[in-house]
Amino acid sequence: MAGLFFVIVVLGLWEFYSLLEKANYHPQKSIGLIIGAGILISIHFRVNFSFTIPLFGFFFLELFRKKEKPLVNIALSVLGVLYVVVPFSLFIILYFLYECSNETEVKYLILGFFFLMWSNDTFAYLVGRAIGKTKLWERISPKKTWEGFVGGLLLTQGTAWVLSIYFTELELLHWLVIGGIVSVFGTLGDLVESMFKRSLNVKDSGGILPGHGGILDRFDGVLLSAPFVCTYLLLIK
């Protein structure tokens, strides 16, 4: 799991910084990749240091770059780590916290989260294509509709019910709540990534997945829903 997350994070962070470079911004791309990968590796091996310490490296290293708008460069470099690295890091932290308590098999909780995310994306798309008429946020994403959102939400609740039967680590109520969180914040995450791409005048975040765009296109909902799901799981732990 950690290995898969590492690949996703590195590729996603590369895409994020590359998009900014195409728009004539100057984030600390190489350093950002090193810091992002280092944070994920250190968490996996339980190295005890704060998230915040490596991020200050961006401030100091900008002194040597002689680039215009250093404040913007630092802010965008930090944003990449916050947006791409932190969500997947939280899954690994969650894994250790749950496994240490011997209360549940947290791998099923993480797998269930992805099932819910895929369910929401798929059903929202299908319902939206079938009966969608009312635009959800036309300025950002003209194809998304309220009918698709509601359809995705309701059918994801059905998926949560199925998960509660097979993944008994959580009660039905908790699976339903997580399904709701995924539907709301996953949709918002999709809209946020669309906002990013629209502001940078690009259609896809990358081309690593032919026909599907880039890593950020496939995991946009995950990036902004994972922190809320992990927080909920920690609260009910």
Image (tube, rainbow, N blue to C red):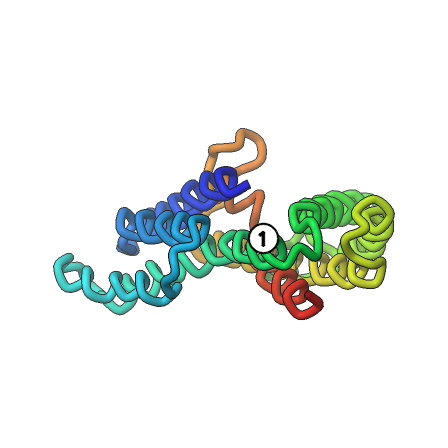
Q: In the image, is 228 to the left or to the right of 19?
A: right
Residue identifier under label 1: 95
Quadrant of the drawing holding the C terminus: bottom right
- Single out the residue that lies furthest toward the top: 210
The percent position of residue 106, horizontal first and vertical second, equals 66, 51
Q: Residue at x 77, y 53 (%)?
A: 169
Mark 1 nearby-residue class (10 Å; few <14, some 14–19, many ≥20): some
Quadrant of the drawing holding the N terminus: top right
The percent position of residue 64, horizontal first and vertical second, equals 12, 59
Q: Is residue 204 visible?
A: no
Q: Look at the numbered disc 1 and give the secondary structure of its residue.
A: helix
| Front one among 68 and 228 | 228
Q: Residue at x 31, y 65 (%)?
A: 53
The percent position of residue 156, horizontal first and vertical second, equals 80, 52
| Front one among 168 and 17 | 168
Q: Residue at x 81, y 52 (%)?
A: 160
Q: Residue at x 79, y 47 (%)?
A: 167
The percent position of residue 197, horizontal first and vertical second, equals 48, 52
Q: Quadrant of residue 72?
A: bottom left
Q: In the image, is 160 to the left or to the right of 216?
A: right
Q: Amino acid at mark 1?
A: Tyr
Q: How many marks?
A: 1
Q: Is residue 86 visible?
A: yes
| Front one among 128 and 133 | 128
Q: Quadrant of residue 56?
A: bottom left
